[in-house]
Image: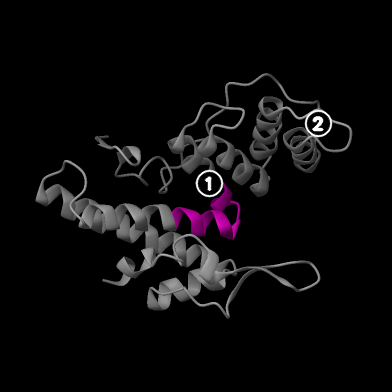
């Protein structure tokens, strides 16, 4: 598979600007020692959370947290896959690696975690906007093919997120505009709005407008 180097993104491939767009690749394992002993996805996730944040008597240890998240993700815990992806994106306890992060987000999306699907749609939409603005050392023919491929994948992730209950994804899919302050992206258990669609990456800067063009 051909790789494109974008200074602002790193290595970009057709398959999801990384391995995220439906390649089916297994989540990458962090270069970390084994985390705490745990038998279930929920137990591993809880252990990872405690280690990552230094909670419940645990010393903060991002490296061991990443290992525990990895085990939980392998046991099909969507939230763990998403959390580990964020650690790879930020280089927290593991080497910074956006492609591994995308792969883990794709697994979280497959496990029905709507924010992961929405986040990948944003990454792909951003890449489309960058290609359309002339960034990246590719020919016009290659640029056109990449744009259509990434557009289609972005729409696919938005559709998945919408089906899983993300109102922001539904709005972006239908109109390309999810910058709607009255629309709530996430609520607390008590029903209070924690995040509005207008505050979500992609909605706040119009990145999804390119999807319907």
Q: Quick one: quadrant of the C terminus?
A: bottom left
User: Which residue is tagged 1?
Assistant: 105
Q: Residue furthest right?
A: 57
Residue situated furthest left in the rendering: 140
Q: Nearer the viewer, residue 203 or 81?
A: 203
Q: Does residue 166 appear left or right of residue 9 in this picture?
A: right
* Among the 4 quarters of the image, the one containing residue 124: bottom left
Residue occupying image coordinates x 73% and y 27%: 61
Q: Image point 67% across, 18% down: which residue?
A: 33
In the figure, 79 relative to 152: above or below? Answer: above
Q: Which residue is mark 2?
A: 38
8, 160: nearer the viewer: 8
Q: Is residue 200 above or below residue 177?
A: above
Where residue 156 sits, quadrant-wise, is bottom left
In the rendered structure, which segment of residues is drawn in magenta?
Answer: 107-121
The prevailing secondary structure element of the residues shown in magenta is helix
Asked which secondary structure carries label 1, the reply is: helix
Tag 2 secondary structure: loop
């Amino acid at each position: 598979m051909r790789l494109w180097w974008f200074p602002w993104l790193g290595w970009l491939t057709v398959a999801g600007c990384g391995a995220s767009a439906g390649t089916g690749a297994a989540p990458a394992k962090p270069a970390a020692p084994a985390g705490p002993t745990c038998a279930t996805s929920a137990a591993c996730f809880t252990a990872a959370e405690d280690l990552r944040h230094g909670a419940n008597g645990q010393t903060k240890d991002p490296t061991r947290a990443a290992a525990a998240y990895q085990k939980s993700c392998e046991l099909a815990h969507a939230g763990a896959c998403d959390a580990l992806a964020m650690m790879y994106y930020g280089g927290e306890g593991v080497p910074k690696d956006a492609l591994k992060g995308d792969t883990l987000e794709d697994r979280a999306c497959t496990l029905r975690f709507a924010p992961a699907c929405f986040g990948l749609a944003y990454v792909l939409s951003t890449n489309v906007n960058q290609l359309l603005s002339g960034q990246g050392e590719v020919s016009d023919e290659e640029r056109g093919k990449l744009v259509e491929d990434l557009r289609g994948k972005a729409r696919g992730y938005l559709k998945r997120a919408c089906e899983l209950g993300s109102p922001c994804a539904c709005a972006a899919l239908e109109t390309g505009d999810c910058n709607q302050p009255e629309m709530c992206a996430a609520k607390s258990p008590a029903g209070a709005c924690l995040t509005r669609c207008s505050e979500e990456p992609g909605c706040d800067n119009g990145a999804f407008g390119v999807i319907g063009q």
